[in-house]
Image: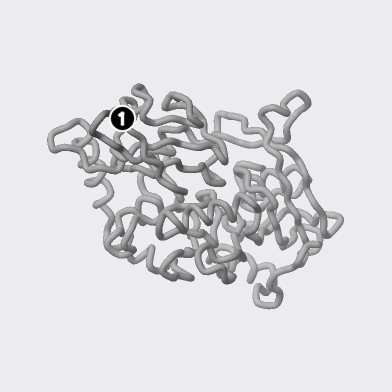
Amino acid sequence: MTDTPVTTGPSRSDRIETITILPQEGELRLDRWFKIHFPEVGYTYLQKLLRSGQVRLNGKRAEANARVAVGDQVRVPRIAREKPKEGSVHALKAASSDIATQRITNADRDLIESMIIYEDEHVLVLNKPFGLAVQGGSGTTRHIDGMLSAMVDRFGERPRLVHRLDRDTTGVLMIAKHRQAASKLGRIFQTRSAAKTYWALVRGVPAPRQGRIEAALVKAATPEGDRVRKALPGEQEVAMHATTHYSVIERVSQKAAWVSLKPVTGRQHQLRAHMHMIGHPIIGDNKYEGDTTEFAAAVEQKLHLHARRLMMPHPITGGRIDVTAPLPLHMLTTWELLGLDPDRFDIVDVE
């Protein structure tokens, strides 16, 4: 990524950034994407930049509610990064944002520190706990992205998300410590050079014991929130191709199975929806019929899905990153209840 100088007047030259939309950022609204990358820019000021054509999507003017896709190019002027003049509307918005990010508590800082399972000068890997959102959203004010942004004094620069996990999914979460690392990590995820392995407990035992699930997905709004489902004929234009490999590690009679899941693509709720489609929903998944009430009374009604391992080339050094996250407490408790030993098996490779 390079900055391209453009001339906007006889005596003025601004530098323009062109930023590529990373994997897992696809389908975000443009204003939401901007808030993540440029939290100091308020909505009113962003609207002004869009109306004047200073911010563009794929070279064209765009509305704040436009949806971005992986690989799209967002043109961002230098003034989006500059500190606004005191007293301006933008300055008031930025100050409000700064106050919000400064509300991180010592307990939040301790939580972030406790989650770190790998760190170097370029990247950070967290073991995300159950129930903590990765990003903000409607009604979500406490999330990892906000905590990290408020710890610039600790990390030197605002860390950047390069992929996401659902709020109730636990495990490995990769963070870029600076923009160059974020850009290169984005390409690694986009070209599927990152190998991700999840562990899950599912209802019943999949047959065959190893297989591949290929089912395009579409998002559907329901009274209980967004769900994804298998695309129907005629929905090809809005469907998202999705592929998952699965392998049964161990079974509990015919009631449940401990499975290894390897997503080839990275769609929202992909693993949860795919396992539901083949009749083996993930235990504790109340969105996709994984209720535990008929399974075992002692099993907590929490999603039993864990991002266990991430293997990928290092974005800067070219070396190898291989990080494994231990199971969360609720899954360890279930493993003990069912007589499963997480230390007996590690990763089951799927051909």
Work out whether residue 75 or residue 31 is closer to the camera in this orientation and state it.
75
- Picture coordinates of residue 64 (x, y %)? 42, 27
Coloring basis for residues: one colour
Label 1: how many Cα within 10 Å (few below 14, some 14–19, many 20+): few
Q: Is mark 1 on a helix, strand or loop?
A: strand
Whether residue 129 appears in this view of the structure is yes
In the image, residue 298 lies at what x, y percent?
61, 61
Viewport quadrant of the C terminus: bottom right
**For residue 348, side relative to residue 99 (left or right):** right
| Name of the residue lying farthest toward the left | 87
Residue drawn 38% across the image and 25% down it: 53
* Front-lying residue, 20 or 14: 14
The answer to which image quadrant residue 27 occupies is top right
Q: What residue type is labelled 1?
A: Thr
Q: Nearer the viewer, residue 24 or 261?
A: 24
Q: Is residue 43 above or below residue 119?
A: above
**Residue, disc 1:** 8
Of residues 97 and 130, which is closer to you in this image?
Answer: 97
Q: Which residue is drawn at 73% across and 28% down?
A: 236
Q: Is residue 137 above or below residue 327?
A: above
* Image quadrant assignment for residue 239: top right
168 shown above or below 125 = above
